[in-house]
């Protein structure tokens, strides 16, 4: 296994441990065809999207519980989207964007629901909850991982300094978007000055600044260049990036990689 790991690193210069890897990725085997048998069974990276609002009293109450529930799982990529639903004249969320309203509503519409709520924690675009109880949050993570493991095919998203690469044993698929999620990799605490949460504090972890579509995956292996000017500019601004492969309009996230 150690020899395999070294070979994979030499092939693609990976900077981080991979969540899922094909045991037959070799430079001298260009005709190799992936099957489910050749992928190692390693726990994948789960994407956790927290939708919250500084004007929602339940966000102030439950967001700390969500943070506590996920902080010990190193295979979770956690990002925060602030929404505008609770913005009022007396207080407007300092991080909110209607773009994030649309992202949250896409999930709700996909699941056939009629209303949104905050806080809402979404894992891999397939499970969600309010964060009321820590055990419920951990169960949602496990459920998301189970759903991915049961899909019957494997996919790995990886990157070096200039390219994104997808390795998979699925030759054809419905179109998935390849997205870069840019976020501030830090914890920020806002003291709310007015409104229902006056003088209360709300913690924000990894606040998302932009989401950019960089490609489309429709099955099979794929290599595409990273948008280096945009990525460089983001890093100069102190932002980090998370790459995800996701069905459009609130569909499942099937692969993720932290750049």
Image (cartoon, rainbow, N blue to C red):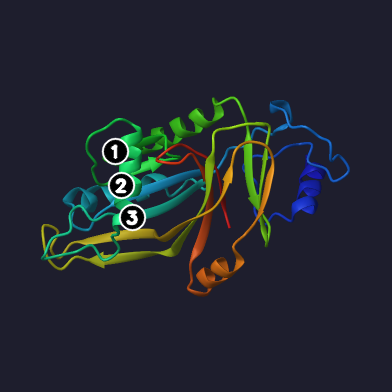
Task: Identify the mark at residue 222; answer none if there is no mark.
Answer: none
- Disc 3 or disc 1, which is closer to the eye? 3
- Which residue position is annotated with label 2? 65
Quarter of the figure with residue 13: bottom right
Q: How far across and down, in percent of the image, does residue 185 sit?
A: 46, 63
Q: Position of residue 147 (x, y in %)?
A: 49, 28
Q: Residue furthest right?
A: 28
Residue drawn at x 58%, y 37% is 43
Assess disc 2: are there few (<14), some (14-19) or many (≥20) residues with their C-alpha within 10 Å of its C-alpha: some
Residue for point 22% across, 38% down: 115
Spatial separation of the CA atoms under disc 3 and disc 2: 26 Å
Disc 3 designates what residue? 99
Q: Is residue 133 above or below residue 160?
A: above
Q: Tell me if 167 is positioned left or right of 44 in this view.
A: right
From the viewer's perspective, tell me whether residue 174 is left or right of residue 128.
right
Q: Which residue is denoted by mark 1 in the rendering?
A: 133
């Amino acid at each position: 296994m150690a020899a395999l790991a070294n070979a994979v690193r030499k092939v693609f210069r990976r900077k981080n441990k991979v969540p899922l890897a094909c045991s037959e990725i070799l430079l001298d085997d260009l005709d190799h065809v992936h099957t489910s048998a050749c992928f190692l069974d390693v726990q994948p990276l789960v994407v956790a999207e927290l939708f919250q609002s500084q004007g929602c009293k339940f966000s102030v109450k439950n967001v700390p519980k969500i943070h506590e529930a996920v902080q010990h799982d190193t295979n979770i990529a956690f990002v925060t989207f602030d929404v505008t639903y609770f913005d009022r004249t007396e207080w407007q969320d300092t991080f909110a964007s209607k773009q994030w309203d649309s992202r949250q509503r896409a999930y709700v519409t996909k699941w056939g629901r009629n209303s949104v709520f905050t806080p809402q924690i979404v894992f891999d675009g397939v499970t969600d909850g309010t964060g009321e109880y820590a055990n419920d949050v951990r169960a949602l993570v496990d459920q998301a991982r189970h759903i991915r493991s049961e899909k019957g095919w494997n996919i790995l998203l990886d990157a070096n300094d200039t390219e994104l690469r997808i390795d998979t044993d699925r030759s054809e698929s419905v179109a998935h978007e390849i997205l870069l999620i840019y976020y501030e990799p830090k914890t920020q605490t806002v003291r709310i000055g007015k409104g229902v949460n006056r003088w209360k504090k709300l913690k924000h972890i990894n606040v998302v600044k932009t989401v950019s579509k960089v490609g489309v995956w429709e099955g099979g292996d794929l290599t595409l260049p990273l948008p280096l000017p945009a990525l460089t500019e983001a890093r100069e601004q102190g932002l980090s990036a998370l790459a995800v492969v996701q069905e459009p309009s609130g569909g499942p996230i099937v692969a993720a990689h932290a750049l």
